[in-house]
């Protein structure tokens, strides 16, 4: 798939192309550049064919749409929506839709590429996609959110579909939003199409075990890492940044495995108890009080202090760029399990590696969600649904195999787990491109 150009009379290598195409001024705050810095490094180590390198570096589709809706007041307002399909060589695009004021095209591009690598790491037949609408959900009524969702879905009709691009929940979207997407798409198709979206209510073709899947995947990856490093489960100390779906469920499941959760945080700050926090009690407190602030079973600490605690495992499960050059040197955990997408900047990677921190990268650690989304898509297409035990067993098998596959690449090439996961994912996607060739 080379373009046939030469460098000083020879065929260009992946390193030549990487050096020519990438921006020399890496911006840690730009999620697409941070993701591509990891991609470029892995591509160099793989000596990736220059033509395939260029193909994988560019998204297949980038769609920007205007989303006009009528507010409850009668006023018309126009929102901006994005959908990016990064790569579909291995299967239809797969990725969430988020509603947030911070949504940008660069962010969506980065997250779409992450989904390509994530699906390849766990070896499920999907490519990567992502979408979002720039809006502030708390300021929208339920009716306005529904109109926004349906109008955005209608704008994406040309690219959505069970065989082309399959959305899922993400930041500030949930089962109800997925139900609106599925219904809107189905009305346009004139028949029910449950497989167009995952993360739906179980009553509409959703899968049992989907809500817990990302946190469960983090639990599986963490326990595999502890086994690999020869560390015990019982008594191992865990700190969790972010107490939403992923953080709270991941903490709860790891607590059941024997770990001691000593600190958790949310937007109100962090709480800490060196003797352990009962996760179920903290979850009940949040259910009743909305935030962790004021929880009586622990002392209040700052959100920044959580990263510097003397713990064995740190689970960042909140936002991008939580661990940067500024605080990476203060991390004392032996293991970081990245429950969020992009919680560690490219600039922090080297510091953590130099300090001997074993990082389970996001495209492996939080792949439980997309894995069970794949299960949901399969069940919808078959019209036959599994019990929760089967979902959990199959998720455990896929996540365990993926961890061991990445670890094998890490050991074979003497690279860290993040580089190994990118190498494994890129090679799997590149292999399909070689087999398929280029349609011209």
Image: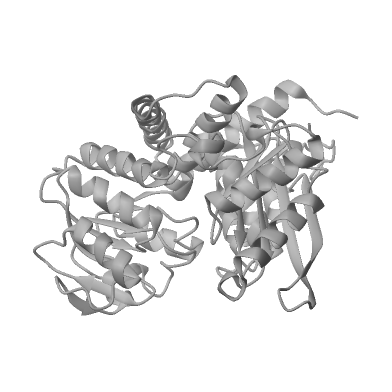
- Residue in view at x 58 percent, y 31 percent: 377
Whether 353 is drawn above or below 266: the answer is above
Q: Nearer the viewer, residue 136 or 318?
A: 136
Q: Nearer the viewer, residue 222 or 413?
A: 222
Whether 431 is drawn above or below 38: the answer is above
Q: Quadrant of the N terminus?
A: top right
Left or right of 401 in this view: 261: left
User: Count the marks: how many?
Assistant: 0
Q: Quadrant of the C terminus?
A: top right
Whether 435 is drawn above or below 75: the answer is above
The percent position of residue 332, horizontal first and vertical second, equals: 24, 64
Q: Nearer the viewer, residue 206 or 234?
A: 206
Asked where in the image residue 133 lies, by quadrant, the reply is bottom right
Left or right of 210 in this view: 257: left
- Residue in view at x 34 percent, y 62 percent: 243
In the displayed orientation, state which residue is furthest to the right.
Answer: 440
The percent position of residue 271, horizontal first and vertical second, equals: 23, 72
- Residue in view at x 71 percent, y 62 percent: 148
Q: Nearer the viewer, residue 63 or 19?
A: 63
Left or right of 127 in this view: 118: left
Q: What is the basis of the colouring in this image?
A: one colour
The percent position of residue 420, horizontal first and vertical second, equals: 46, 40
Asked where in the image residue 223 lies, by quadrant, the reply is top left
Can residue 275 be seen here? The reply is: yes
- Residue in view at x 50 percent, y 61 percent: 346
Can residue 424 be seen here? The reply is: no
The percent position of residue 366, horizontal first and vertical second, equals: 43, 46
Whether 170 is drawn above or below 415: the answer is below
């Amino acid at each position: 798939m080379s373009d046939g150009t030469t460098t000083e009379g020879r065929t260009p290598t992946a390193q030549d192309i990487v050096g020519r195409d990438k921006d020399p001024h890496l911006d840690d705050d730009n999620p697409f550049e941070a993701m591509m810095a990891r991609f470029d490094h892995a591509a160099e180590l793989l000596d990736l064919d220059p033509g395939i390198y260029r193909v994988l570096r560019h998204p297949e589709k980038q769609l920007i749409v205007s989303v006009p809706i009528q507010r409850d007041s009668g006023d018309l307002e126009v929102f901006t929506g994005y959908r990016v399909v990064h790569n579909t060589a291995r299967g239809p695009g797969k990725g969430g839709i988020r509603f947030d004021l911070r949504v940008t095209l660069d962010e969506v591009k980065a997250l779409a590429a992450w989904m390509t690598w994530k699906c390849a790491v766990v070896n499920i037949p999907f490519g990567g996609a992502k979408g979002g609408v720039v809006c502030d959900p708390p300021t929208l009524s339920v009716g306005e959110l529904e109109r926004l969702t349906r109008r955005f879905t209608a704008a994406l009709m040309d690219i959505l579909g069970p065989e082309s691009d399959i959305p899922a929940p993400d930041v500030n979207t949930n089962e109800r939003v997925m139900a609106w997407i599925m219904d809107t798409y189905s009305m346009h198709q004139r028949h029910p199409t449950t497989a167009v979206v995952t993360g739906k209510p179980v009553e509409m073709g959703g899968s049992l075990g989907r809500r817990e899947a990302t946190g469960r995947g983090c639990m599986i990856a963490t326990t595999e890492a502890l086994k690999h490093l020869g560390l015990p489960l019982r008594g191992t100390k865990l700190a969790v940044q972010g107490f939403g779906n992923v953080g709270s469920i991941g903490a709860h499941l790891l607590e059941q495995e024997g770990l001691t959760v000593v600190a958790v945080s949310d937007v109100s700050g962090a709480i800490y108890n060196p003797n352990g926090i009962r996760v179920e009690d903290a979850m009940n407190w949040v259910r009743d009080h909305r935030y962790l602030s004021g929880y009586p079973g622990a002392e209040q600490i700052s959100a920044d202090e959580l990263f510097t605690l003397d713990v064995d495992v740190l689970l960042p499960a909140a936002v991008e760029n939580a661990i940067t050059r500024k605080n990476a040197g203060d991390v004392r955990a032996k293991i970081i399990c990245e429950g969020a997408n992009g919680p560690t900047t490219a600039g922090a990677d080297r510091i953590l590696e130099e300090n001997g921190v074993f990082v389970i990268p996001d495209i492996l650690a939080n792949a439980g969600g997309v894995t069970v989304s794949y299960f949901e898509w399969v069940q919808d297409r078959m019209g036959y649904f599994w019990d929760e035990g089967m979902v959990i067993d199959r998720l455990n098998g896929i996540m365990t195999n993926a961890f061991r596959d990445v670890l094998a690449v890490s050991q074979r090439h003497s690279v860290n787990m993040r580089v190994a996961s990118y190498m494994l994912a890129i090679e799997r996607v590149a292999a399909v491109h070689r087999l398929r060739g280029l349609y011209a």
